[in-house]
């Protein structure tokens, strides 16, 4: 508080004659600020150890007042401690009841069907991941907007375009949490599978097993010849004009053989490959319900080919039980 800070400054001025004894205390807050100012991660709580030192200096000022008037010293101490104490009491009362996150989770749990896919920009909600598939984004950005039409529910702050807000959770105080919107996609997207044959596929390695990724059997698979390293690719060539909008890589009986980091490229008319902005519509494999897969969507693009490039590193090979390519029949 302002009064406490003023008392600390006054106390530092009053003890300057005995500076040798007080110097180690005075250096401590400065050292904390200097150290944490150079850190890559900063949090307000890092300053908490220094507050004890400021309280000691404030106590020196109150002790100086007490020598002259004990009643005045008590009044000054209460004036300094009162506002922070009141704020702390209000905070305790506020968090004693359900916050906006709690209310949002209760409403979703009551209204969402088991297995529903929920996109959230509030990852700390605490949704039951054994009941729902929760896809988390840091913000409702371009990637979240790509994924939202494939979701059953969206939990975010504000009211982004393309969503119909079903209900809002309004905080009763500043400590109750953010204002949360529970929404659904205004225009849910339904993609259509593109028929593929083994002749449509090519790969940087183990090309002879590509037919196993199209045989409809989750027990068979194409996989890379070695542990995952950047540069392994799988390519699909198609007749021109297909409005491609997504790809699904079923993992079958080896869910831990998912690609570490996939980049998706579309083939242009001049033969150039253009990287697509993609969004995942399922959570990490360990949190998925039902058959595990990697599902990527992107803005519809009419192209003659698609290339999937694995650019990550893992000790396991890259494995695909079934490759499913999707197009958007309603794309312009």
Image (cartoon, rainbow, N blue to C red):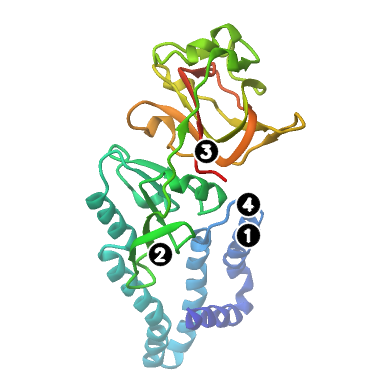
Mark 2 or mark 3, earlier in chain: 2
Marking on residue 79 = none
Structural distance between the alpha carbons of marks 1 and 2: 34 Å
Structural distance between the alpha carbons of marks 2 and 3: 29 Å
Residue contact between numbered discs 4 and 3, judged by CB atoms under 8 Å: no
Q: Is residue 109 above or below residue 45?
A: above
Mark 4 or mark 3, earlier in chain: 4
Q: Secondary structure at mark 1?
A: helix
Q: Position of residue 15 (x, y in %)?
A: 58, 78
Q: Is residue 42 left or right of residue 156?
A: right
Please tell me whether mark 1 or mark 3 is closer to you in this view. Answer: 3
Q: Residue at x 61, y 39 (%)?
A: 301
Label 4: how many Cα within 10 Å (few below 14, some 14–19, many 20+):
few
Residue 307 appears in view: no
Q: Residue at x 29, y 57 (%)?
A: 102
Residue contact between numbered discs 1 and 3, judged by CB atoms under 8 Å: no
Residue occupied by mark 1: 31
Q: Secondary structure at mark 3?
A: strand
Residue occupied by mark 2: 178
Residue occupied by mark 3: 297
């Amino acid at each position: 508080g302002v009064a406490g800070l003023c008392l600390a400054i006054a106390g530092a001025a009053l003890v300057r004659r005995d500076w040798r004894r007080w110097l180690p205390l005075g250096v401590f807050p400065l050292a904390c600020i200097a150290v944490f100012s150079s850190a890559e991660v900063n949090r307000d709580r890092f300053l908490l150890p220094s507050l004890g030192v400021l309280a000691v200096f404030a106590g020196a000022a109150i002790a100086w007042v007490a020598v002259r008037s004990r009643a005045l010293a008590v009044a000054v101490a209460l004036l300094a401690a009162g506002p922070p104490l009141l704020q702390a009491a209000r905070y305790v009362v506020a968090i004693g009841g359900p916050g906006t996150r709690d209310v949002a989770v209760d409403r979703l749990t009551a209204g969402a069907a088991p297995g529903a896919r929920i996109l959230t920009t509030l990852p700390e909600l605490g949704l039951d991941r054994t009941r729902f598939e929760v896809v988390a984004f840091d913000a409702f950005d371009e990637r979240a907007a790509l994924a939202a039409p494939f979701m059953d529910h969206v939990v975010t702050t504000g009211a982004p375009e393309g969503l119909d807000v079903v209900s809002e959770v309004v905080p009763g105080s500043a400590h109750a949490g953010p204002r949360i919107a529970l929404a659904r996609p205004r225009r849910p997207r339904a993609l259509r599978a593109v028929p593929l044959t083994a002749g449509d596929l090519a790969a940087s390695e183990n090309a002879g097993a590509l037919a196993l990724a199209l045989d409809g059997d989750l027990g068979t698979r194409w996989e890379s010849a070695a542990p995952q390293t950047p540069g392994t690719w799988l390519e699909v060539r198609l007749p021109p004009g297909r409005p491609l909008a997504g790809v699904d890589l079923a993992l079958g009986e080896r869910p831990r053989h998912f690609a570490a980091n996939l980049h998706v490229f579309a083939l242009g008319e001049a033969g150039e490959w253009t990287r697509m902005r993609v969004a995942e519509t399922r959570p990490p494999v360990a949190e998925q319900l039902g058959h595990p897969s990697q599902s990527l969507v992107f803005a519809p693009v009419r192209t003659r080919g698609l290339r999937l490039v694995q650019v990550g590193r893992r000790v396991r090979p890259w494995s695909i039980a079934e490759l499913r390519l999707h197009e958007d029949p309603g794309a312009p």
